[in-house]
Amino acid sequence: MKGLFDKKRQGRGRHPKEGGLTREIAGIIIGLVAGTVALCWVLNTVFLERYYVMNKENVLLSGFTTIDAASEDGSLDDSSFDVTFDNLCANGNITVMVISPDRTIVRSSVNDTQRMLIEFTDIIFGGTQNETTVLAQAEDYVIQRRTDTRLDAEYLVLYGTLSNGNLVLMRSALESIRESAKTSNQFLLYVGILAIAVSTVVSVFISKRITDPILELTEISKHMTQLEFEVCYTPKGKRRNEIDELGTHMNEMSQALEHTISELKSANNQLLLDIEKKTQIDRQRKEFLSNVSHELKTPLALIQGYAEGLKECINDDAQSRDFYCEVIMDEADKMNQMVKKLLTLNQLESGNETITMERFDVTELIRGVLHSVDILIGQSGITVTECPAEPIYVWADEFMTEEVVTNYLSNAIHYAGGKKEISIRCREQEKNVRISVFNTGDPIPEEDIDKIWSKFYKVDKARTREYGGSGIGLSIVKAIMDSFHQQCGVINHEDGVEFWFELEKGKQS
C-alpha cells in the first residue's frame, strides 16, 4: 500500500478554458434569440401580407353582411344607419357605394360619387386598364383582387346584390396593407436587433452566474485529484439551487475522502511498522537461536569430552576423575544458570512475570548482596565503598531489584581493573532514588554503549567467557527496569565505568 496515494495520475485530461462554458451558453441564448427574430421576420415577409389580405376579405364580407341586413330591414337609407356605416368605412379603411337599379346613389362614403360610379361600372363590366383575380365568389357577391395599371395600384374589391335589389361596391386599397407589413417588418427588425443586444448582455450575466460555480467546482475537483482537500465550495446566493447542492455534496465527499485517506495512510503506516517489527522479531529470533547455540556449544563440548574421558578411563587416579567430574558439573551449572536467566528474561519481556510493588530499604538490600559476594570480592582484591548507613526507602519489586544490583555488582567485580575499586552510591532526587555501581578499569567503547543491553552481546568476549558470563545479565536489567517504568543506563568515566538505575522514592520513616 506504500505510495498508493502519492502516485501521479497519468493521462489526465485537459481542464476546459475558463469562460469557455460561459461563451457556449451565451452563444446558445443569443443564437436562440437571433434565430427567433429571424424566423419571425421571414414569416412576416412571406405570410403577413397574405394574412392581411385574408383578414381584409373577412372585413369586406362582414361589411357586406351588415349593409345587406340594413337593406333588408329598410334602414339602409335611414339616418339611424349613418353611425354604423361611418364606423364600417373608417375602421375597415373601406370605400363603399350603394346604388339602385336605376343608378341612383343610395349611400356613398366618398364625395366624388360620379367618379366612384364610373369605377363601379368599370368593375362590373370590366375595363382594359385593370387586371382582376377572383378571390371568392358566392350567389350574391364576388371578391376580386384588382390592379389598376394606370395608377399602378392594387385594390381588394367586393361587389354584389343586396336583398332589396340594390347594388353595392366595397373597395380597399392593398397599398396600405403592404405599407403596414413593411412597417411591421422594420419595427420587428429594430426590436430584434435590440433584443439580440439585450440578450447578449443578459446571457453573459446569466451564463456567468451558472458557469462560475461550475468552474469553482471544477477547480475543487482538480485539487481533489491531487489529494488537496482544503478548498471548499461556498454557495453564492441566499437561495440554494442544484449547483449549491452539488457543491455541498462535493464538500462532504471531500471531507469523507480526506478522512478515509487519512485512515488508509495510518493503516499503511501501521502495516509498515508491523512488517518492520516482524522483520526485526525474525532477525532477533535468528540471532537468539544462533547465540544460544553458540553459548551451549562450548559447555556441551566440554561435558561430552570429559564424560567420554571418564567412560574410557583415560586417567585411573581418583584426583583426575574428581577433576573431570568438577569440570562437567561446572559447565552443567553454567548451562543451568543461562537457561534460568533466559527463562527469566522471557517472562519479563512477555509480561507474564508478576511485579509486586512494595516499600523497602534499598541500602539494606545492597548490604545483603555485598555480603553474598564477600568471598568473591576478597579473592579479587577489590575495595568496596558502600552507600550511607541510613535507610533509604523505595517502591519496587524487592526480588527483582536484588537481581539488578547483583548483575551490576557481578559485572563490576569481573571487570574491575586499575586500582580495583568499586563504589556503590545512592542519591536521592525529587521523586526518585538513583543507585549506581562504579568500578575502576577500562571504559566501554562508545560504539558499544547502546548494544550492551542486547541479549548475548559481549564487549570483551574472551574475558566474559573467562568468568562464565553469558551476555544476558544486562538484558535482564533492562527488562526489569522497563517493567518498573523506570530508567537505567551507563556512564563512562576517565578511570572506570558507572552503571545506574532509578527507583521511585518511598516515604522515609
Image (spheres, rainbow, N blue to C red):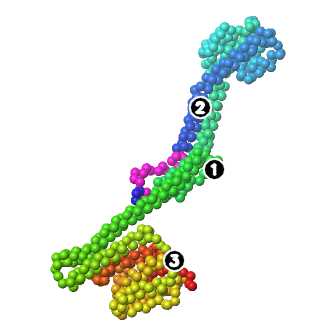
Report whether 176 appears left or right of 469.
right
- Residue 153: where, in percent of width, then height? 63, 21
The C terminus appears in which quarter of the rendering? bottom right
Tag 1 residue: 237
Q: Residue at x 68, y 9 (%)?
A: 140
Which sits earlier in the primary sequence, circle 3 or circle 2? Answer: 2
| Amino acid on which the number 3 mark rests in the picture | Glu
Labels 2 and 1: the sequence-earlier one:
2
Residue 323 visible in the displayed image: yes
Can residue 105 be seen in this snapshot? no
Name the residue carrying label 3: 358
Gap in angstroms between the C-alphas marked 1 and 3: 71 Å
Would you call the spot at circle 2 few (<14 residues within 10 Å), some (14-19), or many (20 or more)?
Answer: some
Q: Is residue 91 left or right of residue 372?
A: right
- N-terminal of the pair, mark 1 or mark 3, is 1
Q: Residue 420: x and y, percent?
A: 36, 91
**Magenta segment:** 5-23
Which residue corresponds to mark 2?
A: 40
**Does 78 lie within the magenta span?**
no
Between 372 and 24, the residue placed more toward the observer is 372
Q: How many numbered circles does the render carry?
A: 3
Can residue 18 be found in the magenta stretch?
yes
Above or below 35: residue 103: above
How busy is the neighbourhood of tag 1: few (under 14 within 10 Å), some, or many (20 plus)? few
SS state under label 1? loop
Report helix, strand or loop for mark 3. Answer: strand
Task: Give the amino acid at mark 2.
Answer: Cys
- Give x and y (percent) for residue 429: 52, 84
Q: Which quadrant of the figure has residue 2?
A: bottom left
- Between residues 412 and 29, which one lies in front from this camera angle? 412
